Image (spheres, grey):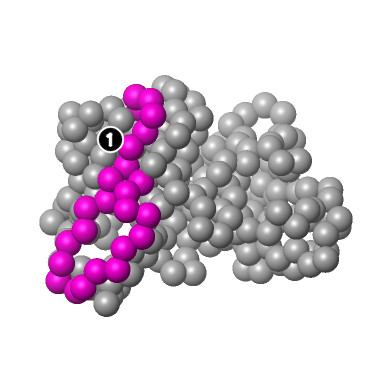
Amino acid sequence: AQSVTQPDIHITVSEGASLELRCNYSYGATPYLFWYVQSPGQGLQLLLKYFSGDTLVQGIKGFEAEFKRSQSSFNLRKPSVHWSDAAEYFCAVGASDSWGKFQFGAGTQVVVTP
Amino acid sequence: SAVISQKPSRDICQRGTSLTIQCQVDSQVTMMFWYRQQPGQSLTLIATANQGSEATYESGFVIDKFPISRPNLTFSTLTVSNMSPEDSSIYLCSVEIGTGAYEQYFGPGTRLTVT
């Protein structure tokens, strides 16, 4: 079965600074990887996904993520954060042999300071 | 993507009662899912709801506690039965858009508090 770990529960970043959120997964084959963002009182919004191909994927809101098979990682990055990026971010992994069954990480809460 | 709505958006219920949560999608979808997000926790899949068949429940979740209906391709309900304070959570439905797209889009959630 697949699993996903987000080592950072909470990150504080200054507005305009860069942001990197870590995600490590465990799965025997090539996983399907996702990043979602949950703003206060909102549902989850899909930021980006990786299925195959180019290991650097671009998403919405200026986010990108890089799949590194050797490190079993799928870290999310943004070069310059905005106050509106304050939210909780979830990494999720799916698998071809358990279609539709996503495993979510514990989430990383991002606080943006002026 | 799709527009997904849930009703109610929040509710406060007494223990021992039941609440039915509705999920409506603005387009026909094959796969619908129900998740639970307990306070301060991540999302846990409760069940997969396919139209025309019984829901498939994940380990730790049973039909008697969380009965699900899926009468058509745009609508589903989740009932939380015989509630206890431990059922206080956000319940979210999600849908997969497009066959093989393997992306899930989430509704805004229903925040349930059981007293």
Which residue is drawn at the image coordinates 24% and 69% (left, top)?
A: B13
Q: Chain of mark 1?
A: B
Question: Measured along the vertical axis of the image, is residue B100 above or below residue A44?
Answer: above
Q: Amino acid at mark 1?
A: Phe
User: Where residue A32 sits in the image (x, y, percent)?
Assistant: 54, 37
Please tell me whether mark 1 sits on a helix, a strand or a loop.
Answer: strand
Camera-side residue of B28 and A79: B28
A111 left or right of B113?
right
Camera-side residue of B105 and A77: B105
Label 1 neighbourhood size at 10 Å, few (<14), some (14-19), many (20+)? many
User: Where residue B10 sits in the image (x, y, percent)?
Assistant: 36, 60
Instruction: Give residue A9's quadrant in the image.
Output: bottom right
A5 left or right of A77?
left
Quarter of the image for the C terminus of chain B: give it.
Answer: bottom left
Camera-side residue of B46 and A27: B46
B12 falls in the magenta region: yes
B60 falls in the magenta region: no
Q: Over which residues does the magenta segment extend?
A: B6-29
Instruction: Give residue B107's quadrant in the image.
Output: top left
Residue B52 visible in the current orientation? yes
Residue A8 visible in the current orientation? no
How many numbered marks, from 0 up?
Answer: 1
Q: Which residue is mark 1?
A: B75
Which residue is drawn at the image coordinates 27% and 51% (left, top)?
A: B21
User: Where residue B112 sits in the image (x, y, percent)?
Assistant: 33, 64
User: Where residue B36 sits in the image (x, y, percent)?
Assistant: 37, 57
Which residue is drawn at the image coordinates 19% and 74% (left, top)?
A: B15
Q: In this view, which residue lies farthest toward the top?
A: B99
Which residue is drawn at the image coordinates 49% and 34% (left, top)?
A: B103
